[in-house]
Image (cartoon, coloured by chain):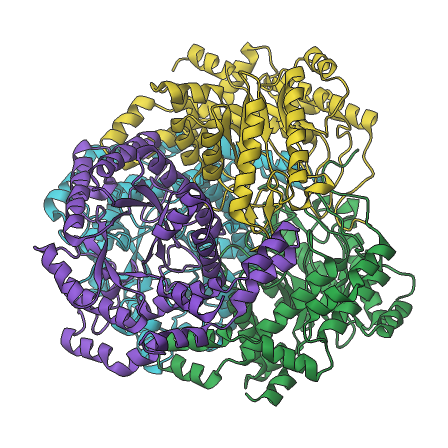
Chain colours: A yellow, B purple, C green, D cyan
Amino acid sequence: MNTSTLFQALDQQRIETPSWGYGNSGTRFKTFTSAGAARDVYEKIEDAAEVHRLTGIAPSVALHIPWDEVADYSELRRFAEGRGVALGAINPNVFQDDAYKLGSIAHPDAGVRAQAVDHLLDCVAIMKQTGSRDLSLWFADGTNYAGQDDLRARKRRVREALAQVHDALPEGSRMLVEYKLFEPAFYATDLFDWGAAYAHCLAIGEKAQVLVDLGHHAQSVNIEQIVAFLLDEGRLGGFHFNARRYADDDLIVGTTNPFELFCIYAELVAAQRSEDDLTRSTAQNTAYMIDQSHNIEPKVEAMVQSVLNCQDAYAKSLLIDRERLAAAQQTGDVLEAHRTLTDAFRTDVRPLLADWRRARGLPEDPIATHRASGYQQGAARKRGTASAGGGFPVKS
Amino acid sequence: MNTSTLFQALDQQRIETPSWGYGNSGTRFKTFTSAGAARDVYEKIEDAAEVHRLTGIAPSVALHIPWDEVADYSELRRFAEGRGVALGAINPNVFQDDAYKLGSIAHPDAGVRAQAVDHLLDCVAIMKQTGSRDLSLWFADGTNYAGQDDLRARKRRVREALAQVHDALPEGSRMLVEYKLFEPAFYATDLFDWGAAYAHCLAIGEKAQVLVDLGHHAQSVNIEQIVAFLLDEGRLGGFHFNARRYADDDLIVGTTNPFELFCIYAELVAAQRSEDDLTRSTAQNTAYMIDQSHNIEPKVEAMVQSVLNCQDAYAKSLLIDRERLAAAQQTGDVLEAHRTLTDAFRTDVRPLLADWRRARGLPEDPIATHRASGYQQGAARKRGTASAGGGFPVKS
Amino acid sequence: MNTSTLFQALDQQRIETPSWGYGNSGTRFKTFTSAGAARDVYEKIEDAAEVHRLTGIAPSVALHIPWDEVADYSELRRFAEGRGVALGAINPNVFQDDAYKLGSIAHPDAGVRAQAVDHLLDCVAIMKQTGSRDLSLWFADGTNYAGQDDLRARKRRVREALAQVHDALPEGSRMLVEYKLFEPAFYATDLFDWGAAYAHCLAIGEKAQVLVDLGHHAQSVNIEQIVAFLLDEGRLGGFHFNARRYADDDLIVGTTNPFELFCIYAELVAAQRSEDDLTRSTAQNTAYMIDQSHNIEPKVEAMVQSVLNCQDAYAKSLLIDRERLAAAQQTGDVLEAHRTLTDAFRTDVRPLLADWRRARGLPEDPIATHRASGYQQGAARKRGTASAGGGFPVKS
Amino acid sequence: MNTSTLFQALDQQRIETPSWGYGNSGTRFKTFTSAGAARDVYEKIEDAAEVHRLTGIAPSVALHIPWDEVADYSELRRFAEGRGVALGAINPNVFQDDAYKLGSIAHPDAGVRAQAVDHLLDCVAIMKQTGSRDLSLWFADGTNYAGQDDLRARKRRVREALAQVHDALPEGSRMLVEYKLFEPAFYATDLFDWGAAYAHCLAIGEKAQVLVDLGHHAQSVNIEQIVAFLLDEGRLGGFHFNARRYADDDLIVGTTNPFELFCIYAELVAAQRSEDDLTRSTAQNTAYMIDQSHNIEPKVEAMVQSVLNCQDAYAKSLLIDRERLAAAQQTGDVLEAHRTLTDAFRTDVRPLLADWRRARGLPEDPIATHRASGYQQGAARKRGTASAGGGFPVKS
């Protein structure tokens, strides 16, 4: 692949950053606040715009409702566009209202389920104002103890609610169904793995696609294989990128096993070039979104690093010698095939990416530019540091 | 539930034992041989018949081809029936021929794939002679290194081969598609989880059902939830029962977490009584099969223990107060619902089961009866002890 | 074992409940508040006293400083004693002050380390007033990213701080050093496993013992073996009891794998009768403490259930036929030895425990008594329901 | 670091390859034999010599007794030296004799324990002839079922046996005590983790050190932290290098998470330069050994790749800017510290290593040279392909 083709491929990468990644977050034990962390959706959009200015490949920001609720979403859209970013996926919240203690769309009580579905439908309405293509659905629903609720009944409630939302989606839009092994539920999570999400999507219709969050699998699960499987079935909708070693650690993507991130991108790039129409179009429509908790890091710098780590993995995956790979695979030359992959991974793509940035009028070293810019210090002066702390105990 | 109803429910339980559970087995490091271990399919059937005589609920024995290959399967069937057991599921072997080093039905070479499919079709032909309903399919196919083969291409090869076999199945028979997280493949296994098996079954037809082996999941996966999900989708075909703590340990079922086995049976018993026709018929047709490696235990005693552990879990699950459970679930009484389950689990069903055995003319204490019978000593005298040992190194 | 001996053994069981188990708690996503949850240390002590009245084996309550901070600990002690319970282990908090973002006793900054040690020494002073024997130490210290800090340097800082505290402990008291695989740190936790805690204890002195929290291990780790190892080395100090399937789920002890809890008690009971003086005295001095988060359950009922689950496991472990077990172990009769254990586990000890409670003037069915007593409703009336919710986002 | 210093550091790296890595190996299901796989210890030494010729950093070969048993070890030593390699660690085998079904040094029977200790002492005698410094001890000892044997008694038997061997070691030699989470034991492994191995080493004496096998940990355990801890305690003895995703997969080191291997080397290089004498001397004496099963790969090529992967990780770890790292760590600049590490990891060291090889008279591309050399084809012609296959069933 020559430089011009590589640059064109690099131009096409898109990473969506999440509004909530710019605010304070923490673990159940404590939220350590950061100086200058964004206090509202406008400041979050400003931070997202800064990340896009620095990287050139983060042109949209995901919203979370009601955390980012405003009176006029058309005005919010103009605000964002004025700063150079678009509004991205809408993320409903059906896990923090007091009603949801035992679930939302899987709750045994029909009234609670209706409340949850109403909120999801409200978010569909918001999508129309924000110009969002994707409704990104994560449910905390689950149970903590064997017997606590009927697993099959809960499954059917989930199916019914998802179908309602699906049928309300406007043409051209999609719902992304996220799955998660556990947390906050500790016995059974209703959407517990990709198979469960996939079965629901298949049953409810074409607009339903599976969302893969890199932190939501059991130990040792091969994520790139799930990605490949869903691509081949035409049901991969998007990603929540982050990194983990233990549970849903929500660290900066690519920090615990950069080779895994590379292998995931290797599948995506291969699918984008597939001769199979469904696989190719699925890969081309996949949404790439960050979903992380920056508990101890400066928020904007952490997000820039995240975007760069995705770019690094993507660039390396572009360098895979696909012909050499296919030949080794076909002849069963195990080590040569593996080396073809690792040769691309071992390549230092930092010079290539610096060239691309220079050619595109972007800062060659986004991190250094950000640190030198005074952006963070300015935010700290303007926004201050939150005094609240979170974590146990909550006084009753 | 009164005693008579309980006894009728107990009468209906069936556990199929595997022929290979009566022969020597081991780990990759060593096969420690046992005195009296069965040497051929006839001795295996004799052992299976002994297990059924002792327990009354193990009336069939699964075969593995070619380990149990004979010239005349009709004669073998008569041999088994003469000893009081039927021939059960047929288990093809596409993982030990030298051709299968890099896979069988997913192999990059079409010739190897054809060899594998031919063997599977041969096994379909055997089913007709043995009177078996189920073709039980486990594939060792997978890769050890990232890049070794094309994951999507392998998936398509698997789909194609499964479809061929599916369409050759006689009316009324089924193929059970087993999945496994890993081993012997250590990077990616082609049928890696229930979702992959389910997607294939859905695509190829009604006779394809998913087989759940209790030892084939990632750490912490909730198996009873997968069981519930598959029951509700009408795609649970059967079980390979065993126990594990670490990997596919293939220990005696119920020995590492008896509460988990109980929870699985609780889902099955609930489904057998479901008002939903598909769920109920799926539960009623589920095949319950042991699949274990008795590396250090006496083979027949280990199998009797396995069958009894299943009976214990099933009996306890019959005792769940379903009305109390449903009421607590509906009102969100978390702890009361959980206690309803655990009250059944805490019940000592040994007296009940002794009563049932006495009423059915079975030995009250099958283990004690077996140990007192001299069966094992007789087998040791007649069959001797293998001298071979297995394990590394294999001399070239 | 005859009934009288069993009753005497049952009399000796002690479970300490934690003050924080009576207040609201939650996950990082949300704290769902409970009606009547205790609002301060006095209400927590009242709840603990209720648990002890109902069960008879929960005579002390652990405190957490500063959550339970009061001006006069002698007065608090009298308050507790007036309600029939003693003050138990003191749990310092060096993870919620803003200074501890990057650690406490392992922090790179000496000033932060000194602040943490000062707090620990304050807690030693509190122990003298509360009459507590044990200082129970859990540290959230760790790092989220490879390279974030120097692992060996952090280890040395931990050693130094622990030694300072150790040397300040009054005669007859102990420090219990807890370990945890992860959370809130996601790359490396400074006290990451029992081996790390053990090595530190060994180095700093006789008053330092290891605390085993059942939820703090990697998947599949055999906890009863760690318990046995520490007992034999004379370094088991105590337990934090809870249950988990995935991470540090902090569920009610005994709910995910009751057989595991039984196996742990089986080791403890065996050690209490050991002929080895060190092992025996270690077992006899072991502290049994609950540490759970009751996120969706009524607090007091959940705690009663927890204590009863421990009693159930302990009672069953008393029933193990030790002679039969030893004989089977010595002769290598694998299945007979295992059955000896499971025969005790399968026994329904509820009648025995009801008898014991009746004989001791306790309610035969503590849960039913509690639910009928109106205690929870009274607390709800008196204490109300907290309005705060916790979870993301924390406004800056 | 300038090139000359880097070259000197690269000169010091040593990787020992294992004789058994050149013979056929497999999983419990099947051993697929390789054309030209070594048939005896002489051929294994020839293969090891080829790996050293190609890489320049694999100057010794570990032996396994009795797999590599010969009448005259002095002659074997001369044979090896004549081919340019030394004999390395001696690995006793106490897991394949029929007597070891229920254990070796932890066996309940004193006679079996004595047999095992005798073999270990025989191996000590062999060390003197082979000139080996290290006795490398792995025990398969463990149990498959709760209650099968007394965990504390087994621990004491292990301690006693290890102490006997320790005291027989000649001056200047060491015993490396390996631990393993599981396999072939599936309930409890007697030497189950680093803490257990460490406690034994500490108790028995200065010549006992812990051996870290990269595949022997529970999921998600941070291995570099264990390495750092043992280095700081002066008890790290050596490594068994390999890679894994699931269990003890024994794949080529560095293939599943190359960043992890880099982090481990980063700790080792830091310790080699430590100002602490004990840490530094421990790091300098650490033994680096491969321990893998090349089930589907060509043996010699797989071993060359393994050695090169270690070299790659080591070279990158030499490039870490230690001053920048220390400064960022001290000031709590989380992301800058992490980037300092990843900047070294992202560097493509292949040109540097090619330069070093050229300068040292080694082939610039060892894999290409090996593939072009005809070595493998020659071995296949001379040695043939084993017909034996291994795996189940073993005929009795």
Residue B384 seen by the camera: yes
B364 versus D323 height, above or below: below
Q: From the top left corner, tell me how far across and down residue C333 is, in percent.
A: 35, 78
User: Residue at image x 70%, y 37%?
Assistant: A25
Q: From the top left corner, tell me how far across and down residue C200 is, in percent.
A: 63, 63
Q: From the top left corner, tell me how far across and down residue B97 is, in percent.
A: 17, 47
Q: Quadrant of residue A100?
A: top right
Q: Is residue D204 left or right of residue B67?
A: right
C316 versus B5 height, above or below: below
Front residue of A108 and D396: A108
Q: Quadrant of residue D13?
A: top left
Q: From the top left corner, tell me how far across and down residue C123 is, in percent.
A: 81, 63
Residue D154 seen by the camera: no
User: Residue at image x 64%, y 16%?
Assistant: A128
Q: Is residue A12 left or right of residue D110?
A: right
C113 versus A371 height, above or below: below
Front residue of A166 and D356: A166
A207 versus D286 height, above or below: above
Q: Is residue A332 left or right of residue A250?
A: left
Front residue of C366 and A257: C366
User: Residue at image x 79%, y 52%?
Assistant: C35
